Amino acid sequence: MRGSHIILLILQSSMKKVVFINEMVKAMKREHKAGHSIGFVPTMGALHDGHISLISESKKENDITVCSIFVNPIQFNNKQDLEKYPRNLDEDLKMLQSSGCDYVFIPETEEIYPNGNPDIKIDFGTLDKVLEGKFRPGHFKGVAIIVKRLFEIVTPDHAYFGKKDYQQLLIIRHLVSTFKLTVKIHACPIIREHDGLAMSSRNLRLTIGERQIASKIYEILCSVKEKAGHLPVKELQGWAVKKINSNPAFRVEYFEIVDKNDLHILKNWKEIENALACAAVFLGDVRLIDNMELFS
Ligand code: AMP
């Protein structure tokens, strides 16, 4: 270990690890009472630099940063996907400690959902019917329930979400406005690997061969950005699907060019400044999602 690393570890105060809800509530009350602003980053663990970028953003703007790690069973519409979801707690704790995170909240499912499957009364309009919502029924309801629950426990002033899950970001904003929550939502850029593949916990499940070709999705998103405005929207969308599917290892579930404000499918380029290309693609049995703003 290099000298600078040793000094860094000594200087960094120890991150507090909290398992129980009442402990978390007490700690957050103490922090608010001390006049500290609280920034919050909810995650499902198997952390990577994408998650850590959210922690860094929170640290810039808050006195205290809290990260939660909870693999939320009710947002998985596919049981196998839940079972295979990567879990890496020891590594996660090391990464969070060296990122300077102040608290990590790691609750048990039984404590979060003591009465089995909870419900929430919220109408997302078309927002949860398209893209991910169309292929993962119930997913966003599960996301809304856990995020609301975590907000009630952590009582953050600010919460940080990645644009990697762009639709989720809009769902959270809708949740906050529906329930008039006081937390401010921040959207953070997509962090990518050197070859452009969007960082994701699910990338850990790719074989070496699959990993080598996975950046193709990013390359095609870049080509779509270059071609945007030059080909009719529908033609460009069809071109992208065909191009990805031309490699038999890939299977496009959807590739759509939408308005980034409400996710309706664009018919033409009149509002090109709002255009967002969104993709969900199976590579083997791993489902990868990515997106790119086409005008920025
Ligand atoms: P997850 O653990 O997948 O639920 O993600 C937790 C948070 O990290 C969500 O707000 C994600 O959008 C965000 N996130 C995941 N991957 C990335 C990435 N590559 N770049 C930026 N944010 C990300």
Image: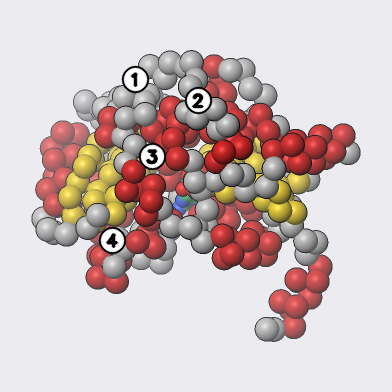
Check disc 2 and give the amino acid type.
Pro
Nearer to me, 67 or 226: 67
Q: Contact (CB < 8 A) between labels 2 and 4?
A: no
Q: Residues within 10 Å of mark 3 (few under 14, many from 20)?
A: many
Q: Residues within 10 Å of mark 4 (few under 14, many from 20)?
A: many
Residue placed at 18% from the left, 55% from the top? Answer: 250
Residue highlighted by disc 3: 76
Q: Contact (CB < 8 A) between labels 1 and 3?
A: no
Q: Contact (CB < 8 A) between labels 2 and 3?
A: no
- Picture quadrant where residue 128 is located: top left
Quarter containing the N terminus = bottom right
Residue placed at 57% from the left, 65% from the top? Answer: 91
Label 3 CB-ligand 1 distance < 8 A: no
Residue highlighted by disc 4: 214
Mark 1 vs mark 2: which is more N-terminal?
A: 2
**Residue 143 on image: x %, y %:** 47, 33
Secondary structure beneath label 1: loop
**Residue 86 on image: x %, y %:** 43, 57
Position of 7 relative to 52 (above/below): below
Mark 2 vs mark 4: which is more N-terminal?
A: 2
Residue highlighted by disc 2: 118
Q: CA distance from mark 4 to mark 3?
A: 23 Å
The disc label shown at residue 150, or none: none
Q: Nearer the viewer, mark 4 or mark 3?
A: 3
Residue highlighted by disc 1: 126
Check disc 1 and give the amino acid type.
Thr
Q: Nearer the viewer, mark 2 or mark 4?
A: 2
Q: Nearer the viewer, mark 1 or mark 2?
A: 2
Check disc 4 and give the amino acid type.
Ala
